Amino acid sequence: MAQFASAKPSVLNPPPPSSIAEARKIVAAMRANPRGPYDSIRWFCNDGSILPARPYGCAELGGGKQHALFSAQRERLAQLGWRVGTIFASFDELAPESIAVARPHLRLRELPLERYLVDIDDGWVLHKARGYRGRVQIEDEQRAGLEILLNLLKQNDWKSEHFILARELTRTIPHNQDSVDPTRNIRRQSQLLAELERSFEPLRAEIHGHPTRATAKRIRLWMSEKSDSSAQIMGLAEELAVEMEDLYSVKGSARRLQTLADTLRKHDPGVSETITAASQTGNSVQRLSLLAEAVTALRSAIQASDSARINLRRLNLMTELEAELLAVSRVAAAPVTRGDALRRAAQLLQATRDLGWLSDNELLALVEPLNTTLSQGDNLGAEDYRKLIRRLQLAPAWAQASIRHTFAEALAAYSALDPRAAQFVDDLLRGSALMPLAEVTHRLLLDSGRITGKTSSLFGQAQESVWGLNPGVAQGKLRVLAVAEDLDGHNFDPADIVVIPNTTSSLFPAAGIVTIGEGNPLSHIQILARNLGIPNIVIGESLLPLLQQHDGARVELAAAADGRVLLRLAAPSDTNLERAVAQQRDAEKVLAPVPDLRVNKPLPLAQLNAGLSGRVVGPKAANVGELARLFPDRIAPAVALPFGVFAEHTGGAATSPRLRVKQAFARFDSGSLSEAEFLAELDKARAETAAITLQPTTRQQLAEAMEKEFGSAGGVGVFVRSDTNMEDLPQFTGAGLNETVPNVIGFEQQMAAISQVWSSVYSRRAMAWRSRILKNPDDVFSSVLLMQSVPSDKSGVLVTTDLTNDGGSGFTVSLSWGIGGAVDNESAASYLLKADGQDLLLAEAKAPYQRYLKAEGGVGWRAAASGGILNPQETAELRALAREVIDKYPPSYDAEGQALPWDIEFAFAGGKLMLLQIRPLVQRGAQAADKIVSAIIPQRSPDGILRLSDKLAE
């Protein structure tokens, strides 16, 4: 499916730059103001009156509350989208949101982000206002906060559906039973210290990475070397050292655990006994096991109870219990054998799910193979061992996606205002059970890598939290792009290797792509990268600082087909890699077919067939016609406008758009036109094409064809889909380069949409990608496919091969709720439908919103649930479809004569499987990349069988 015009709901789009600039000025002013975001202290009476501060101001008006009145600056900041300086005594925003598209509790989702910035920035907007007397009354704040939390927890389904949000709100909202999380306090205080004193940064990194009791000693050493620092800095450092000494001491842990046990004894005696046992054992490994068991029991108690008040107490204690689990993991003896490590991983996975970071399905997908392996004896195949550990690497990314799903709107807004807010997700993960799980996984990965040789290398360091998505080789400047930085091509060169926060549907061409967060494997940008041989690798967020150290340096990137990755500084004369890159680029260039322009009238679905592909209509329309013959009940009605109609409307005149583009390419290639002038000509051609009015004859022919095919000319919603002679080729898919205008209703609107779709072939991004692989990108012609709208409940992509780089066989599926999410790189559910009949979860859907067809035309947005999407019947239907396509559909071949896998777009509407498109999946670059990577990281053949009772490699 081509790229939709509307890529995000409004609540996920960052505010305009002018709003951000104004907001930052307001925040700076608040930070310097002794009253912060407040104007003055007032009485807020129960009858609605607001009175000056005086004793018993509301006594004669039915009572009231005294607190600060927001300033005009704060009200303006709220209008811009940031409601800071929250006062819970006046918090009345639990009503339905004012933004129609928004999910429930949008305001509540902002609170943890606001609190995070207050914690790490010495008060942030309250920097000088924390001492503003009377701004809040703590009793009123706690009473109001308690009421908010109890009202939420009274809804039994709410605590299950919003468990992460529930936990964070109990940490954020005052309620007289506030949870204590020393690990979070330590992390945020260390970040504040590093902000105030740069020399503390190495200690901050240690505290955020692998803190121990010894860290406190290094803090005191730092203090002795910085004795001339301010009293504030020395006081913060002293508090930090004392808190860390207590957190990692045996006595401190036993004391805190016994307090927890005493608190739980009345309502949860079983959990209390388990925690008491943990407090009394001197064996740190046993203590860790008992704490994980207590977490599981506490989560079960929360789910089984209807008491909001008791569950609130349990949520508070769960926060403290997770902090203790994290602290004990720092002092517990490391696993010695592979079996020990796998058992600890299984234990921590269960705790991670019970703490809310993983879903039930995610836990099952990871822990079931572990338990099966541990139950089958001491022997295990080396390659099976590697795959098992590779699966464990998915847990942090899955948890990260859950956090982003929960706080998506707030993250978008606050990260735009203050980029430090983007670190909120990392802060939550580092204070969770995922940290000790990641450390165990790292040990296992090192062990597996030494056995199989399947490791990666980043700047000379062996790394495990990196793997290749798409094979290929590249040389270029490394560009680390910020979260809020625009990815439209203005901030990097096509020869750069770009590091981006996640894959995006609108990325301009790059030599290589490094992704922090995988996206989904079948989005348009992933297919383009695979098609063009652009190496695309994924790194764990912990490796970002290493890449930032080399930002701007010339580097070499090679990603092998088996997932191994090599990223290093470019050598002055690395002829092997230079030759590989050059050969790959030469091999990429292909000649796009010039179509037959004599057919210039609409073609109904029944007349479309594979023989017309690239000659009369684009491959999309031709393949839809072919699918209609093989699967007649699964294709929506459609009409195609051939290339000849496009040629009639865009050519002929001396100033026609097609001639303008032809001349611009010729002049640019000759050097008589600068790049800026060339792009300006391209923009003019696009604007001229978009303004075209279809000729009367064409309009009449279309009206008649649509009347026969759809039963109405304009009365039925249609997707107006681009379909060029330069897409879905055996050598180049061109996926997602042009616009699709979705669900257009009304004949005049549909005619205008045709011109809009035609014009998109001249977009800068589309031309840039085509120019990378085609010898004649200026010979682009567009047909248009008008396809009746399918009201999809869920939609996605099925590829008839295994794209997981694990060397297996099966079919890869990505899909999202609603219309077109999986191909537009939203956080889609992904599965591997294995040849042995088993299904392997690759990711659950975590996009917070989904598209739907609006009755009046176009698409709207509504909230989307996270989790799995496919049910067993749908999975069986997709398996059957893949096999049937392989058996029946005319194959497409690569340059070596090998049959290419199929990339099939599909939808389920009312339970019925519908087919939207089919194209060959082209993959390039693997052979050259394999040679480069193997020269540096030799791949050994696994020795066959290993023993779980053997010691882990050091």
Image: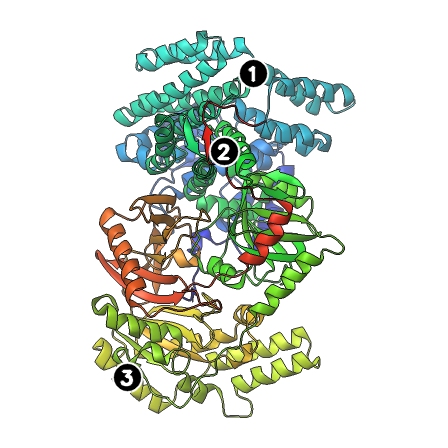
Q: Give 8 or 818, whichever is nearer the viewer.
A: 818
What x and y, as percent, mark residue 87? 46, 33
Q: Residue at x 50, y 32 (%)?
A: 441
Residue 107 found in image quarter:
top left
Q: Position of residue 316 (x, y in %)?
A: 41, 23
Give the position of the N terminus as an image quadrant.
bottom left
Q: Residue at x 66, y 57 (%)?
A: 577
Query: Which percent across, then down, holds residue 28?
Result: 63, 42
* Residue 248 - label: 1
**106 above or below 930?**
above
Residue in the foreground of this view, choosing between 267 and 728: 728
Q: Residues within 10 Å of mark 2 (few under 14, many from 20)?
A: some
Compare residues 57 and 747 and report the one nearer the observer: 747
Q: Amino acid at mark 1?
A: Tyr
Question: Which color mode does the image show?
Answer: rainbow
Disc number for residue 703: 3
Q: Position of residue 377 (x, y in %)?
A: 37, 25
Kindly identify the residue that appears in the image at 45 percent across and 14 percent down: 287
Left or right relative to 909: residue 849: right
| Label located before the other in sequence (2 or 3) | 2
Image marks 1 and 3: residues in contact by CB distance under 8 Å: no
Which residue in the protein does label 2 denote? 428
Kindly report the distance in space between the C-alpha atoms of the residues bearing marks 2 and 3. Answer: 57 Å
